[in-house]
Amino acid sequence: MAGCMLELMNQSYSIRYRTGVPAKNPGWLIRAAGLSALLLISGLPTITAAESSRHSLDVPMLDSSEQLRLSDYRGQVVYVDFWASWCAPCRRSLPLLDSWYRQYREQGFTVLAINLDRDVAAARRFLQRYPVSYPVGHDPSGVIATDWKITAMPTGFLFGREGQLRQVHRGFKSNGVTGLQDAITTLLEQPRKP
């Protein structure tokens, strides 16, 4: 519970920091944390509309001249995963994401992986050892990673069918995978809008 409250307080601080609105009294932070807790309990997303709308993705595919665009997957539940060959936790996360992709893709789930290696050969060697069946883009300059404010590896963003950002996952911990899988299945259960 302490970790949950710390995350809520960090989230509230982060919103205040991004908006530039200083807290005139600590009650603002407490009220914001309480509101975040209510939203969390109710199952509604705690990601702001501004946060959700800033995420665009248009990056070259790792092994083709085609572009990988997040907008092409509207109507699906999408997990965008930033990774690199030097990322030790990625050795566990990519195969797990691939198993979920295979399990849920017929229901409208996809994974879009964004590799951040400068050396494309290192990324290809990694994928030979840990192959995936979902699309992989390449951002060797880190421009997209900077835009998305990547601070840990791997980092994943879960989007609902309407393109709204629902969750952000920084790092990979085995004890957190059940919660992520539950979030994916919950979003898949929501009806597609025509």
Image (spheres, helix red, strand yellow):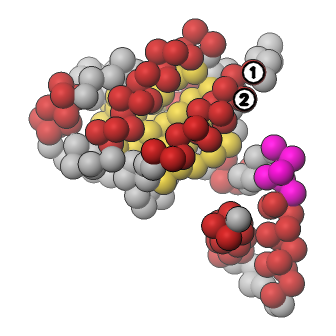
Magenta region includes residue 134: no
Amino acid at circle 1: Glu
Q: Is 181 on the left-hand or right-hand side of 147?
A: right
Which quarter of the figure is the N terminus placed in? bottom right
Badge 2 marks a residue whose secondary structure is helix
Q: Is residue 179 above or below residue 97?
A: below
List the residue tagged with mark 2: 186
Pointer 2 with pointer 1, Cβ within 8 A: yes
Q: Is residue 158 above or below residue 110?
A: below
| Real-space Cα separation, disc 2 to disc 1, in angstroms | 5 Å
Residue 172: image location, x then y, percent? 43, 48
Residue 19: image location, x then y, percent? 71, 71
Residue at (67, 26) in percent of width and height: 185
Marking on residue 189: 1
- Residue 147 visible in the displayed image: no
The magenta stretch spans which residues? Answer: 38-43
